[in-house]
Amino acid sequence: MSRLARWRGTVLTFSAALTAALALIAVIMLSLDKAPLAAAQRFIEGAIGTPSARADVIMAALPMLLCAAGLLLTFTAGLWNIGVEGQVTMGAIFATIIARTIPRDVSDWGIFAALIVPAELLLAMFGGALWAGLAALLKIRGGINEIFGGVALNFISVNILLSLVNGAWRVGTFPQTAPFAPAALLPRHPELRLSPLGIGIALAAFVAVFMALRGTRFGLQLRAIGRNARSAGILGVRVERNIFWAMVACGALAGLAGAFQALFTRGRLLPNISGGIGFMGVLIVLLTGVRAAWVLPVALFLATVPIGSLKLATSLDSAVQIDAALGNVFQGALVLAVLIGGGVRARLAARRKERSEHG
Amino acid sequence: MDDALVRTLADIVKVGAPIVLAAIGETITERGGVVNLSLDGSLVLSALAAFIAGTSTGSVIVGALAGIGVGLVIALIVAVCSIELKLSQVAVGFVLTLLCRDLALFLGIPYRNAQVFPTTFLPIPVLKDIPVIGAIFFNQDLFTYLSFIAVAAAWWWLFRTKAGLTLRAVGERPQAAFARGVNVNAMRYLYTAIGGGLVGLGGAAYTLGVLPTWSDTGIVGNGWIALAIVIFGGWYPLRVALGVYLVAGLRAIVTSAQAQVPPQVVELLNALPWLLMLLTLFLVSGPYLDRLLKVLPPRLHPPIRTVLRARPPSALGTVFEQEGRR
C-alpha cells in the first residue's frame, strides 16, 4: 500500500474512533441531564482557549511524552512494560530525596545551587531505572512475565510512597511532604506555568529515542527481538541484554516523568503522585500502533483531556459541571475504539485482497 | 481449636470468595486458550453494576445477575477482538482494564459509601454444627458457597467430563481438536463468556457480600492478584483456590497487625501480598524449582512438583486460523 493511502487510512480510523468515543461520552452526559455540546465548547475553551491553558496542556503532555518515549523502546522489543507506572512513582520518590532537603534560601550556595535540579533529575532517572531493571531481572532470570512483575512492582511502589508520606517525610496534617523550596523546583517561565528546561529535556529525550529506533544498532536489535525473539537470538542478537537495557532506558525516562510530576506539576510529594501518567504513556503508544512519529501529536492531544476536564469539573454551570473522571473514560474508550478500528480495517483489507486474488 | 482462629479462618474463606470466583473464571477462560486480561477492571465495573441493581431492586439475585451480565459482556468484547479481529488479547484486555475501572469510578460517584447492602447470610443446617469445619465453611453468605461450588464444578468439568476434555484440547492443541470435529472458536466464545460471567459474579460478591457497599478501594488490584494466582495454581481449580486462601490469609495477618503498628509500617505490610505474588511466580515459572529440588530428598519431589509445577495451556493467547474458512 502506498504511503499516502496508509496515512489516509490511519486518519480515517482515528476519526471514526474519535466519533465513537465522543458519542459514548455524549450518551453518558445526556443520561445525567448534562448538555454535551455546551460542555464540548467549554472543554475546548478551557483546554486551548487561553495562553495559560495552552501552557498547562504542554506541561501536562511532557511527562506523558517521556513515558511514551520510553515505552516505544520496550514495545518495539515486544515487551509490555506495565510497570512504567511504578517507575514514575519511584522517580518522584527519588527526586524528593534531594528536593525535600533543599532550604528556602540557597543564595550562599554559589555554583552548587545550579546543580540542585540536575542532581534531582539524575537521581529520579536512577530510581525509575532501578525499578525497571528489577522488573527486567524478574523476567530474564525469574521467568516472571513482565506484566505481572510490573503490576506487583507498581503496587509495591505505591506502598513505599504511602509509607514515606505517612511517616518519615510527612509534614503537617495531610500525608504529604512540605512544598519544595523554589530552588528545588524545575525553573519556570516568569508569567506562564511553563518550564522551558522541562520542554527541552522532554523533547531531547523523545528525539533521542526516535533516532535510536531509526538509526542505531540497538534500535535494530530491539525491532528484531520484537518481531521474533528466538530468531533474533539465533542470528546472534543478545536478546536478554537488549531487553534489560530497553527496560532500564524506559525506566529512566519514566523516572524523569515522575520528577516532573513532583518538581513541577505538584511541587511536593503526595499520594498518587503519578496520577496515571505511566498508563497514559501505554495508551499513547497503543493508540499510535508503536509508531514514533505519531507520539508527539497524540500526547499533546490527550493532554488536553485532563486540563479540559478539570475546567468542566470546576465549572459553576450545572449543565456542564461533570467529574473529571469522565476524561479518563474518554481516553480509554478512544484507545479501545482505535484498536478495534485497526482490526476491522485489517480484516476488510484482507478480504479485499482475497477477493481480487480469487476473482 | 480456639474460637478466634476459627473466626479468622472463616473470614479468610469469606474474603477470598470474590477472588476465587474471578480466578476460577479466568482459569476456565485460559484453559480454552484465551487470556482475559481485563479482570481488574471487570471486577470493579461488575461490582458497581451488581450494587446498583441489587440496591435498587432489593434482590441479591438481580444484583448478582447484573454483575454476571457485565462480566460476560466484557469477556465477549475480548473474545470478538481476539477471534474475529485478531487483535492482541493483551492489548485489548489491558485497555479494557483501564476503561472499565475508570467507567466504574465515574458512574459510581453518586453511590460512594451510600448505603450497605444486607448480606445474604445462609448458615446451612446440620452441616454448620460440625465442629470447626462447620463454623469455617458452612456458616457463610451466599457468595462464599457459590465460590465453593465454582471450584468443585470447574474441577469436575475440566477433569471428569468429555466436554472438559474438549475444552482442554482447544487450549492445548486447537488444530488437533479441530481435526476431531470441534468448533474451536465457538468453544472459545463459550468458555470466555462463562469465565467472564464468573468474574462478574466475583464483582457482585464484593458489593453484595464482602464489603458490602460500593467502594473501589477494596476491589482494585484484586483482579491482578486473581490473574497471578491462576498462574500460581498451574491452571488447576483446586490449587487456584489454595493460592487465593494463601493470599487472603496473609492479608488477614496484616490486618490483625494493623492496630499495633504506626501507619507507615502498615503501608509497607500491605506490600507483602505483592511480594508473595512475585515469590510464588518466581518459584513456579523460574528455573529455580529444579535447583531447589536437587537439594531436597527425592521422596519430597512428587508432592512439591504437584503443588508448584505450572505449565500454561500450549495455545494460550494465540489465534486459531481455521483452514478453508472464508
Image (cartoon, rainbow, N blue to C red):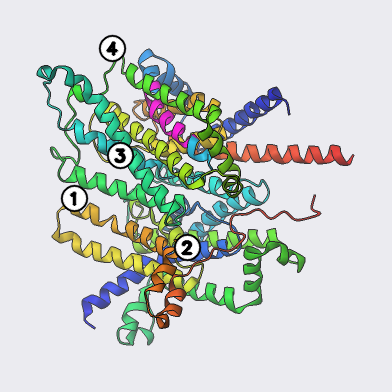
SS at badge 3: helix
Whether residue A67 appears in magenta in the rendering, the answer is yes
Q: Quadrant of the C terminus of chain A?
A: top right
Asked if both marks, 3 and 4, belong to the same chain, the answer given is yes
Circles 3 and 2: CB atoms closer than 8 Å? no
- Disc 3 and disc 4: Cα gap in Å? 32 Å
Q: Which comes before the other along the chain, label 2 or label 1?
A: 2
Three-letter amino acid code at the position of disc 3: Gly
Let me know if marks 3 and 2 both belong to one chain: no
Identify the residue at horizontal 74%, vertical 38% (top origin). Answer: A348
Q: Which residue is mark 1?
A: B264
Q: Are marks 4 and 2 on the same chain?
A: no
Q: Is residue A343 left or right of residue A84?
A: right
Q: Which residue is mark 2?
A: B231
Chain under disc 2: B
Residue positioned 59% across, 34% down in the render: A20
Q: Would you name the residue on which mark 3 appears?
A: A127
Q: For the residues carrying marks 2 and 1, which lies nearer the camera in this image? A: 2
- Name the residue carrying label 4: A191
Specify few, some or many for label 1: CA neighbours under 10 Å numbering under 14, 14-19, or 20 or more.
some
Q: Nearer the viewer, mark 1 or mark 3?
A: 3
Looking at the figure, which quarter contains the N terminus of chain A? top right
- Where does the image place residue B240, in percent across and percent down from the top left? 45, 68
Q: How would you rate the neighbour count of disc 4 (Cα within 10 Å): few for under 14, some for 14-19, many for 20 or more?
A: few
Residue, x 28% and y 17% (percent of image)? A188
Three-letter code for the amino acid on which mark 1 is drawn: Gln
Q: Magenta stretch containing residue B141, yes or no?
A: no
> Of helix, strand and loop, which one carries label 1?
helix
- Which chain letter matches label 4? A
Q: Is residue A268 left or right of residue A125?
A: left
